[in-house]
Image (spheres, rainbow, N blue to C red):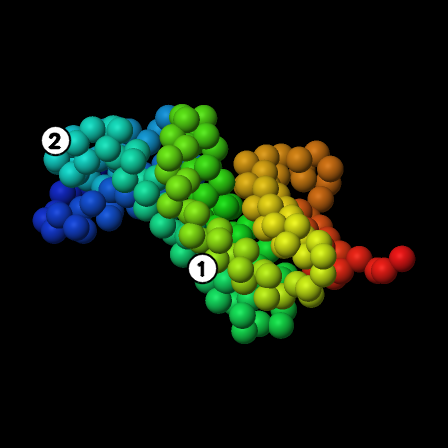
Amino acid sequence: MSAPRTKRRKRSAAEAREEALAAARVLLLEQGPAAVTLANVGRAIAMSHPNVIHHFGSSAGLHTALMEAMIRDLADALGDAVGALHVDAEAPTRLVDRVFDAFGAGGAGQLAAWLVLARELDHFDSLDQAVADLVAAVRARVPDSPDSESRIRNIVLLIAVCAFGDALIGPHLRRMLGQEASATRELVAQLLPLLIAPPPRG
């Protein structure tokens, strides 16, 4: 016996669009980019296929809207991390947690992989200011030295690349190595003081 169909209900255009994007995000995180289709989104929120098309125009329109929404969320997460860096003495470690959470549970890792594989690299342009703000906030925490600018950019690069890799393949690698779920972020947090402190003078 087939499962009962969810009863369709009235909702505003804005509500319908937000519900559709939320469903698309879940599909992306749970099943991958191939599952983000107009039909699957419609089924998830009990919306007819023509109505989904009405809100997004096409599958490409749905994908673009989802990418833009997730990029905004990632930029907001980076903005929160920047704010924390200015007021929190433990911010370097918490910065690692915030960025790892954004790439993992927040879906930025899956999104970034999708954008790269689809050659949709223009979407990353909207992150430029968020990354610049993050670099500036880290700069305020790093003691001044001849190589401080290089160390600042290395800190941001290390955190972001490790968070991205951990979101995609981290769980599988940790299982093979018998490590805990927090192993990668703990390793990055341990490395941060080495990058933040200036090298000893010879």
Residue 140 at x, y = what percent?
A: 59, 66
At a point 38% along the width and 51% down the height, the residue shown is 73
The answer to which image quadrant residue 198 occupies is: bottom right
Kind of residue sitting beneath label 2:
Pro
Decide if residue 127 is in sight here: yes
Quadrant in the picture for the C terminus: bottom right
Mark 2 falls on what kind of element? helix
Three-letter amino acid code of the residue under disc 1: Gly
Q: Residues within 10 Å of mark 2 (few under 14, many from 20)?
A: few
Quarter of the figure with residue 122: top left
Q: Position of residue 187 (x, y in %)?
A: 71, 50
Residue at 59% of width from left, 55% of height from top? 96
Label 1, secondary structure: give it: helix
| Relative vertical location of residue 180 with respect to residue 119 in this rendering, above or below | below
Query: Who comes first in sequence, dot 1 or dot 2?
Result: 2
Residue 142, position as x, y percentages in the image: 66, 63
How many dots with numbers?
Answer: 2
Where does the N terminus fall, quadrant-wise?
top left
**Going by the image, does 10 lie left or right of 145?**
left
Q: Residue 79 got which mark?
A: 1
> Which residue is at the front of the view, 19 or 152?
152
* Residue 74 image offset from top left, x and y in percent: 43, 50
Residue 50: numbered disc = 2
- Residue depicted at x 75% and y 56%: 194
Q: Identify whether 18 is placed above or below 109.
A: below
Q: For this view, does 28 lie left or right of residue 94?
A: left
Which tag is nearer the camera, tag 1 or tag 2?
A: 1
Which mark, by number, is residue 4? none
- Position of 147 compared to 100: left or right? right
Q: Which of 168 and 121 lies nearest the eye of the viewer?
A: 121
